Image (spheres, rainbow, N blue to C red):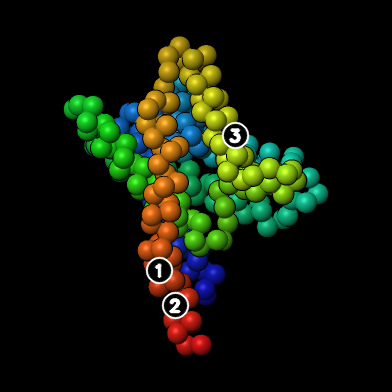
């Protein structure tokens, strides 16, 4: 029962993350690195952002397999249904926020910052529940388990690679820059800060939701 509650909490966290991405997209100042390629792909293909996100995250799972080889565990394939649900939630979040817009640059920044804060809360929830990581973080952990590198440096490398890929695809197929702007930098810099700030209240919420706090009180 507790595992089910943790899974539900994880899906709630994923939903919060997708709304954070949706707010950033509506602000049109650039979005977080992990969503930059799916967003660009959605602009010139029949794919929705959610479906494109499934494909990009699926490729990150494949990279985990290539890095870990025989050390890739069967349970890590649970990332696949997680990615599918995340994609569906992303399209729902974009549908739910389709009426949002802006009239000036300040409003763009407000939407961008709303996206950053929402994204940070969702990421904190994903970390706290510790059921399964998203593929980008899974790739980070895979690389760190095989090579003597720091997780922070690997995360920066992964984020930079995703942003570079989004820029390249955008310029090649759209002949203009889309999805990567000052908001992308803001997300890369500020989301981690938000995660640190909200970690304790999110931990309290997770304990209350799953019953961990009650179990500790009973013991």
Disc 3 target residue: 157
Q: Residue furthest right?
A: 70
Q: Secondary structure at mark 3?
A: helix
**Residue at the image position 43 percent from the left and 53 percent from the top:** 196
Q: Is residue 64 visible?
A: no
Q: Are marks 1 and 2 in contact (CB under 8 Å)?
A: yes
Q: How far, Cα to Cα, is label 1 from label 2? A: 8 Å
**Which of the two residues, 218 or 35, is positioned nearer the viewer here?**
218
Closer to the observer: label 3 or label 2? 3
**Residue at the image position 51 percent from the left and 87 percent from the top:** 219
Q: Earlier in the sequence, mark 3 or mark 1?
A: 3
Residue 206 % position (x, y): 43, 67
Disc 1 target residue: 204
Disc 2 target residue: 213
Residue 197 % position (x, y): 38, 54
Q: Residue furthest left?
A: 103
Q: Is residue 84 above or below residue 43?
A: below
Q: Earlier in the sequence, mark 3 or mark 2?
A: 3
């Amino acid at each position: 029962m507790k595992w089910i509650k943790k899974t539900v909490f994880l899906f709630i966290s994923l939903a919060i993350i997708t709304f954070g991405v949706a707010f950033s997209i509506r602000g049109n100042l650039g979005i977080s690195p992990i969503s930059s390629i799916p967003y660009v792909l959605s602009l010139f293909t029949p794919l929705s952002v959610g479906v494109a996100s499934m494909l990009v995250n699926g490729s990150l799972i494949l990279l985990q397999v290539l890095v870990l080889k025989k050390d890739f565990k069967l349970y890590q394939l649970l990332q696949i249904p997680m990615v599918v649900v995340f994609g569906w939630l992303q399209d729902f979040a974009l549908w739910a926020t389709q009426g949002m817009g802006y009239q000036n640059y300040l409003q763009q920044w407000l939407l961008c910052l709303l996206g950053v804060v929402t994204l940070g809360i969702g990421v904190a929830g994903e970390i706290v529940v510790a059921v399964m990581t998203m593929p980008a973080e899974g790739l980070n952990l895979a690389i760190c388990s095989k090579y003597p590198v720091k997780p922070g440096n690997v995360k920066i490398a992964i984020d930079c690679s995703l942003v570079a890929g989004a820029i390249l695809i955008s310029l090649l197929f759209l002949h203009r820059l889309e999805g990567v702007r000052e908001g992308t930098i803001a997300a890369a810099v500020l989301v981690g800060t938000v995660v640190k700030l909200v970690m304790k209240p999110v931990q309290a919420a997770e304990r209350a939701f799953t019953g961990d706090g009650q179990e500790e009180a009973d013991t």
